Image: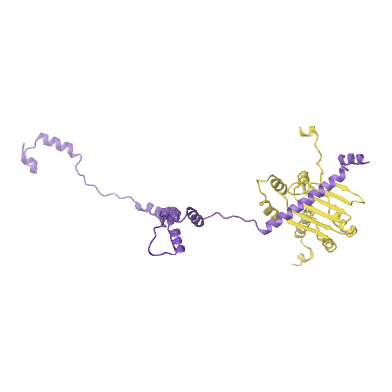
Amino acid sequence: MKRLFRKPPRTPLLVALLVISWSCTARAQDPKIQLAHLDHLAAKATETVDINIDERLIQITAKLFKDSDIDEVQVKKLIQGLKGIYVKSFEFDSDNNYSAADIDSIRSQLREPQWSRLVNVTSKKDGNVEVYISLVGSQINGLTVLSAEPRELTVVNIVGPVDLEKLAQLEGNLGIPDLGIDPPKKKKNDDQ
Amino acid sequence: MNEEYLWDKSGEPDPEIQQLETILGTLRYQPKPLELPDVIQPASQRQKNYLPWLAIAATLLLAMLAGIVWLSFRSKGLEKKYEAYAPTPAVQNPAPTSIEVPTPNREEAVNKTAPTPRQRRDFVARHRPRPVQLVPSQEALLAKEQLMSALKLASEKLNLAEKKVQGPTPNQIRNQHKVG
């Protein structure tokens, strides 16, 4: 009995450490980012968009899209396999209503090794737009768009396999206004 | 022929009779002891095992048949219920009678005796089992609306990023040149 207290058993400790490290790794690979700390901006904002759609809701919604409508079929294909869509967008009536710390709290989560910054546009006049993708192997399993304009802060986090081209093409369909930006045309050699 | 021999075999035997006796003698009764097998299994024992199953199967079959017959009669019965109204030829010009019947009552009587084809169809349609219509829940509709808003926003921002990366479009440059 005394031996037990003298020398702590190693096996349970090792198992516990393995479980903790595995859970930490799994959490780190989850492309869902925490946006709750931006909620305080809602008090200052003139318009707030807060969307939280989990996998269950996506599955329910997918059933509502009609197979007879081509546009709805496209959206249905796009959301197939998605595990969540989370959006926070704040519009302000004046500048400097959000701090650099607010943006850094998002960026710090996107510094994980699974995230890669695809686009980073910095403009003093128009603000910054950053597009991050989360990769597992060679497949995209998450997307985050961080748009920080002087009077608007928007974070879009999509969890799951996303087709960026199809998502970009959605603008102009289903009543979504077209900004007049054409997707880059493929060369003839690419088509063949 | 010596009849004594035929009677009690006392007289002189007839050769033909003796020949017949020899031929038929092989079929004569020969007494031997009864031989029973060591294990006796009654023949009905096997059938007893099948009997309950047969009974269950027969009951189920009968129940199914009864159900089918009842359903077919029920659907026919609804239509026959109308025929109970006995559609009589519509009264075109009722002959004037000495007793005045109030008009509404007369109309009711005509309606009761002769239902219109539309009423018949409605009645059958009301009593016929209908498939359940699935109505999307409020939660699902709200989720769809939110999903579309989220996708719209994501698409806008992606295109905005693309636009900023590509710089001004050639059309814009051309227009600026013309204006300048």
Instruction: Report the side of A46 relative to B74 (left or right).
Output: right
Give coordinates of residue B86: x percent, y percent. 40, 56
Instruction: Report the side of B172 relative to A178 (left or right).
Output: right
Quadrant including the C terminus of chain A: top right
Chain in yellow (letter)? A
Residue at the spot 45% in from the left edge and 60% down from the top edge = B107
- Residue reaching furthest bottom? A2
Give coordinates of residue A108: x percent, y percent. 86, 55
Residue at the spot 11% in from the left edge and 36% down from the top edge = B17
The colour scheme of the drawn protein is by chain
The image quarter in which residue A8 lies: bottom right
Query: Does residue A117 show up?
Result: no
Residue at the spot 79% in from the left edge and 52% down from the top edge = B153
Give coordinates of residue A87: x percent, y percent. 79, 55
Chain in purple (letter)? B
Quadrant including the N terminus of chain A: bottom right
Residue at the spot 88% in from the left edge and 48% down from the top edge = A121
